[in-house]
Image (spheres, helix red, strand yellow):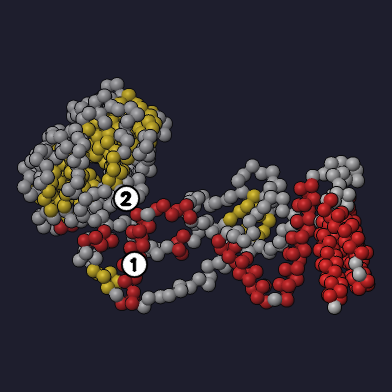
Amino acid sequence: MILCVLGKREIFQDLATLLWHSFGTVAALLREIVNIPSTVTSNFDTCCVKSSLQCTCSSSGLVQYILWPICISTMSVVSRISLEQKQEFDEDIANNSPLDPNGQDLDLEDKHEQNNLKRKKRQREHAAYSSEKDPKAEQGKEMKRLESFLFGTLYSPVEFGKEFMEHREPLLPMTESIDNEIVVYEKNLNEERKPVWVDEEEETAKVDIMKVPRLRKLRKEAGEGLLSGVDYISRLRAQHARLNPGTEWAQIDRKSIQFQDSDSESDGSGIIVAPGYEHIGSDDILQSNDELVVKDHVKLLPGPLEYSRLMDANGEEPSNGAINSVQFHRNGQLLLVAGLDRRLRFFQVDGKHNTKVQSIFIEDCPIHNASFLPDGSQVILAGRRKFFYSVDLVKASADKIGPLTGRDEKSLEVFEVSPDSSTVAFIGNEGYILLVSSRTKQLIGTLKMNGSVRSLAFADGGQQLLSSGGDGHVYHWDLRTRTCIHKAVDEGCLTGSALCTSPDSSLFAAGSSSGIVNIYKQDEFLGGKRKPLKTIESLSTQVDCLKFNHDAQILALCSRMKKNSLRLVHVPSFNVFSNWPPPRFNLKYPRCVDFSPGGGFMAVGNAAGKVLLYKLHHYQKA
């Protein structure tokens, strides 16, 4: 019994020893599988194999008959697997040889890159094949295409050296011209645009912008108060767009987008824009909620005047004497400057450089008055002389004219030119008004007042003439018959010193030696109503210059006898602008003033020989 137990114990010991050594043999064979040469083996593995065989041979018969076949079959399988793995490793080494068939060196990274591209191609073909059968995948692909068109290339950024590009049809119709310019037209992008939601209460809501002080800036007229909800929202958006103009960089020109072909030999940029529309998109009007129909002029609201000072108009060449005349050419870019230094200068006004164009020296006549003919072809200038000059801007010549036939006036310094450029009216002696043809420069007629003449102004397109002087009356003359059609006293005036009519001749202003300015409506004044619409008492010295701007919303009052004696009146409300003259700037002694044809610029000449230039922000054109 004991022997049997001991015999079985030996059998179990032999079995355990054989199994332990078998595991070592399997481990050694597995090491060969992972591409380690067969010659490199550890002593431990060799010992394991030998000991396992010895133990197997010395074991009992039961162990030899049972475990020996298992061990032999296991070793044969593992050896066969190891041999196959080793052959594959040798083939990989042969395929990845650093020499190509021509004997040239190749980079292993290129091989790996080609393998990666092939693998990606197989994956892409598999995905394309599967997406053809899957409607959801096709729908997702279409969504990505549309999102890429709207927001840019988010899913497939462009990579240099990418060989396999996905074929995509153009989203926009494209045509190729003869000169290799590809033009993309957006035809129907905006046809089906509809608002996502419409607030029905906007049509019925009413907002009183006069009750809230911060909303009064939305007014377009002085008496405007109640707005509909739609108008209120539109004006708020327009105000926001004016205050925040920084989003212009995001605007896309949707009119016509042109791309230049890379193979084209043209030197152009490939972009063609219609003249005058370089910075305006073709559908900007449709994308804006502003009013499409704009009136001839927008009403100027009372209150502070928005303006800014620019570089002096004659900053490039200031005058050595007092400035007596400033006037804008009808094109709004050329400014005439004349003064006591006997020079007639022309400046191209842009607000930044104000380049001098020309300077003409008049040797024998300090200039007291100079004016363009309204047609812009000539300049008439005069001083305290018996003669005057006519400067032809086309021929660049100055002609001396006078003395006038039959007259002995020693000074022709005060004159006015008719709006139709046909007549020049000079102030003469003893109440006479001298009418001179602008074409022949000859005296064609005279008019006679009861008192002395101090000021003149044309009205009704040059068919009427207004005059005032020492008797305090305002005369209306019909130049077709050369007769006085009306005479009336200027209220509160002892001696008239200045006259001015509005561009449409509906209003006229009369200034006196006491500094009072009366504003009249011409039809009412001629009809017998001699009460002025408004009396301005802002000046305390003699009024020397009066000037309406192009739309008669601003009236300038000027006196040469006191510093800073220049006032601007808001004509619709007859209120003087409270922030003019500038509180921290000295205008010196202003002598003349003029507005540009579009109202955007105002020029002020002073006794220091400077022409101050201001930008009026209410007006967009010069």
Q: From the viewer's perspective, tell me whether residue 261 is left or right of residue 207.
A: right
Q: What's the residue type where badge 1 is placed?
A: Ile
In terms of sequence position, does the residue under pointer 2 or pointer 1 come before the other?
1
> Disc 2 versus disc 1: distance between alpha carbons?
24 Å
Tell me if I can see residue 477 in this picture: no
Q: Where residue 478 sits: x, y (%)?
A: 21, 49
Q: From the viewer's perspective, tell me whether residue 147 is left or right of residue 39.
A: left
Q: Which residue is drawn at 19% across and 44% down?
A: 580
Residue 134: which quarter of the image? Answer: bottom right
Q: Mark 1 falls on what kind of element?
A: helix
Among all residues in the image, which is located at the extreme front?
2
Q: What's the residue type where badge 2 is placed?
A: Tyr
| Residue to which mark 1 is pinned | 233
Q: Which residue is drawn at 34% across and 67% down?
A: 233
Q: Where residue 604 sits: x, y (%)?
A: 25, 37
Q: From the viewer's perspective, tell me whether residue 620 is left or right of residue 526.
A: right
Q: In which quarter of the image is the C terminus?
A: top left
Neighbour tally class for label 1: few under 14, some 14-19, many 20 plus, Cα within 10 Å:
some
Q: From the viewer's perspective, tell me whether residue 323 is left or right of residue 353.
A: left
Q: Residue at x 72, y 58 (%)?
A: 165
| Residue to which mark 2 is pinned | 619
Tell me if I can see residue 618 in this picture: yes
Q: Mark 2 falls on what kind of element?
A: loop
In this picture, is 218 found above or below 134?
A: above
In this picture, is 133 found above or below 522?
A: below
Neighbour tally class for label 2: few under 14, some 14-19, many 20 plus, Cα within 10 Å:
some
Comparing labels 2 and 1, the label whose residue is closer to the camera: 1
Q: Where residue 555 sits: x, y (%)?
A: 21, 47
